[in-house]
Amino acid sequence: MHELEAKVHGVVIPDRGPGATIVGVSELPDELAARVLRDAGLRVTPQRQAIFACVREGDGHLTADEVHQLLQERVPGLARATVFNALNDLVEAGLLQRVDVLGGPARYDRNLDEEHQHFRCLSCRGLFDVRPRPAPPLDLAEPGFAVHRVRMVIEGLCPACAGPATA
Ligand SMILES: [Zn+2]
Ligand SMILES: [Zn+2]
């Protein structure tokens, strides 16, 4: 693993609730973030930096449209397509993770922890990082399929929506 990459993946974010200790890029200082972009082979532009920072500093599961909206003032004239393209580039460079939520737009996640999954609250529509314990057992009966990764979106009620009885 590349030294800088190791550093990025080694950033440990303090406990944010059910996700316990998670690893991500949200707390990179801006200079390091620019180096990370460059190191990933991406051209460092002010727009791309702002988009990366927006996801890093946001709630962690923003849609492209939300990023576009949040940056309206900070980056005047920012095109929607630029946001989409930059987010896709960041995903391909391994700096963000794309979360596909059934029936909704893709969300962009700064949490690169491979083992975390997502919990979608059916009431407030919030998307939460969770780490199911134990890891989901997966035993494919069909021969010939090689499992590389399992991604889940679990649906239910978050503690706030479920109320005190089940929290
Ligand atoms: Zn909720
Ligand atoms: Zn996540």
Image (cartoon, rainbow, N blue to C red):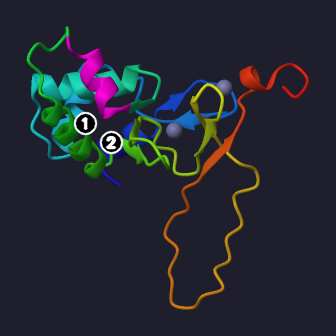
Q: Quadrant of residue 42?
A: top left
Is 112 situated left or right of 77 in this image?
right
| Residue depicted at 17% across the width and 42% down the height | 85
| Residue depicted at 64% across the width and 35% down the height | 122
Residue type highlighted by circle 2: Leu
| Residue depicted at 25% across the width and 39% down the height | 87
| Residue depicted at 63% across the width and 80% down the height | 140
Magenta highlight on residue 68:
yes
Q: Nearer the viewer, residue 132 or 23?
A: 132
The residue that disc 2 covers is 95
Q: Quadrant of the N terminus?
A: bottom left
Q: Quadrant of residue 83?
A: top left
The residue that disc 1 covers is 36
Segment tinted magenta in the rendering: 63-72
Residue 70, x across and y down, in percent: 30, 16
* Among numbered discs 2 and 1, the one appearing first in the sequence: 1
**In terms of secondary structure, what is the magenta stretch mainly?**
helix
Is 33 situated left or right of 45 in this image?
right
Could you tell me if residue 40 is visible in this image?
A: yes
Could you tell me if residue 28 is visible in this image?
A: no
- Mark 2 and 1 residues: CB-CB less than 8 Å, in contact? yes
